[in-house]
Amino acid sequence: KMDLFAIVTIGSQTYRTTTMDSCGRNPVFNQTFKFNIINENDYQIVIRDDDATTTELVGTARGDLAKVRIQRSDRQQLAMQTKSGKQKGMVSVSLNWVPNSALTYGATPQYGAPPPAYGAPPAYGAPPAYGTPPAAYGAPPAYGAPPAYGAP
């Protein structure tokens, strides 16, 4: 008999079911996992056989999240692929989509108090008056013919 468990992965998040001891070829895991999904579009399910000393790969399947994002729920039948790439069996998955209210437009943030409000900027006086330049600068040169280059 096989002692099977499933590993469900979406993006960098992974959950593992409990091992179904002596479940044979048609295990029913019937477990619920909650994932925080931002940009992920698909998921992977890996079925493994838990032996006393090792775990052996039984098969893998991939599913798509596009339909559940739109319809809020979906049931999928996914073909299991063996490590040699042959189809061997199916896995049935039920999906429910619950949008994260903290990420929707106009939602109240779920983190701490907002920063204190900034007051009005300090009042600035009139800019300083600009008069004639100090005598140390002298008068600017008169415009006229450009200097001759090459002469000292």
Image: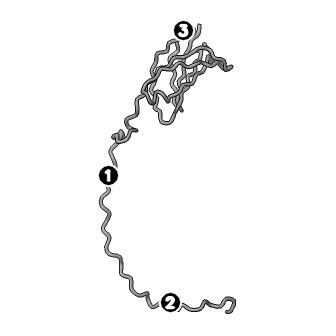
Q: In the rendered view, would you say 115 is above or below 99?
A: below
For label 3, the crowd category at 10 Å Cα-Cα, with few meaning under 14, some 14 to 19 and many 20 or more, is some
Residue 23 - label: 3
| Labels 1 and 3: the sequence-earlier one | 3
Badge 2 amino acid: Pro
For the question of whether residue 54 can be seen, the reply is no
SS class, disc 2:
loop
- Residue with the mark numbered 2: 140
59 horizontally vs 65: left or right: right
- Mark found first going from the N terminus, 2 or 3: 3
Q: Is residue 117 above or below residue 65?
A: below
Camera-near label (2 vs 3) is 2
User: In this view of the protein, which residue sits in the foreground, 6 or 107?
Assistant: 107
> Tag 3: residue type?
Cys
Q: CB of mark 2 within 8 Å of CB of mark 1?
A: no
> Which residue is found at the position 30% from the left and 68% from the top?
123
The residue beneath circle 1 is 116
Which residue is pictured at 34% across the width and 40% down the height? Answer: 107
Please determine whether, in this image, residue 78 is positioned above or below residue 114: above
Left or right, 38 with reference to 61: left
Q: Quadrant of residue 71?
A: top left
Spatial CA distance of label 2 from label 1 is 52 Å
Residue sitting at 48 percent across and 27 percent down? Answer: 67
Gap in Å between the C-alphas at discs 1 and 3?
A: 59 Å
Q: Position of residue 61 (x, y in %)?
A: 58, 22
Q: Residue 92, image x and y in percent? A: 51, 17
Locate residue 125 relative to residue 147 in the image: left or right.
left
Q: Nearer the viewer, residue 18 or 45?
A: 45
Front in this rendered view, residue 144 or 128? 144
Near mark 2 (Cα within 10 A), the count class, few <14, some 14-19 or many ≥20, is few
**Image marks 1 and 3: residues in contact by CB distance under 8 Å:** no
